[in-house]
Image (cartoon, helix red, strand yellow):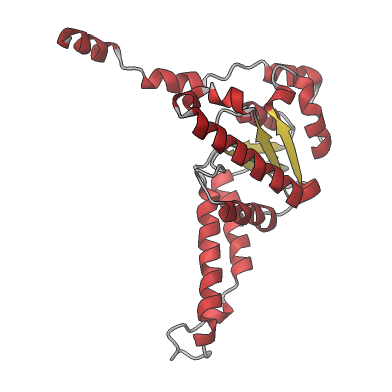
Amino acid sequence: MVDHLFVITYGRSGSTLLLNILNAIEGYCIRGENDGATQRMVEAVEHMRATKERFAHKDDGTPQSPWYGVKDIECEEWGKAVATAFTRHILRPEGDTRVTGFKEIRFTPRHQSDEMFLATLDFLTSAFPNARVIFNTRSVAEIAQSGWWSRRDPKQVQKTIEASNARFRQGKTILGDRAFLIDYAQYNANPEGFQPLLDWLGESVPPERLAEVSAIRLDHGREQELKRKPGLKTRLKRMLRA
């Protein structure tokens, strides 16, 4: 049984296509990125857990203690309450939703440490009921030539993607059957490549629907490129100043 589903990946990995496929499943409402919001939730929960461990001995159970009540903080229950509020107010699943969740690209070493990655993974799969995780990867060579990655130092891109793929594999090992590892090469221009994932979820999407969604052109990367290009007036001013 799956109630929550999280796609963990990095930018330009084909995750938006994967998101569209998941949302083609009846009863699924998987949202897009949230700028790494769950990491902030984990940081808050972990901070209170550390605070309790550090100062519980100073709580003598009376109001005279400056740490009165700290030893009774329910960190696990608070984490679950935060997750419930996140589902209700951020994910906002629609009335007929069976499975909700999100996809997020801010899981690379550039965004969080190995320790925080594991803590976030634990939070997602313990605070959210019946949670499952999909790790989505893509080859370093293709990533290095895609979108904003192509403007970065190739060596740093390789280091980031290889480290991310390694931690995703580690996450799959830790979670076992609660996680699925898929690569862009499996489903790029190949709708049938989603079938193992659908089998893992215990879901089905008609082949014609898979083909239809897979054929949709996603231009968000191109739109970002166009936004970075100077407008006509700016280019004319530069020409006149030259």
Q: Quadrant of residue 216?
A: top right
Coordinates of residue 72 in the picture (x, y in percent):
58, 79
Q: Is residue 4 visible?
A: no
Direction from residue 175 to residue 109 in the image, left or right: left
* Residue furthest out toward the front: 155
Residue at image point 79% right, 48% down: 176
Q: In this view of the protein, which residue sits in the foreground, 217 or 172?
A: 172
| Residue 177, above or below 225 | below
Q: In this view of the protein, which residue sits in the foreground, 124 or 28?
A: 124
Task: Tell me the quadrant of the picture where the C terminus can be found.
Answer: top left
Coordinates of residue 105 in the picture (x, y in percent):
56, 38
Direction from residue 33 to residue 182 in the image, left or right: right
Residue at image point 21% right, 12% down: 238
Q: Is residue 109 visible?
A: yes
Residue at image point 61% right, 37% down: 162
| Residue 80, above or below 242 | below
Coordinates of residue 94 in the picture (x, y in percent):
64, 40
| Residue 31, above or below 149 | below
Q: In this view of the protein, which residue sits in the foreground, 167 or 53?
A: 167
Coordinates of residue 89 in the picture (x, y in percent):
54, 49
Q: Quadrant of residue 233?
A: top left
Residue at image point 75% right, 48% down: 173
Say how many tags the image has. Answer: 0
* Residue furthest out toward the left: 241
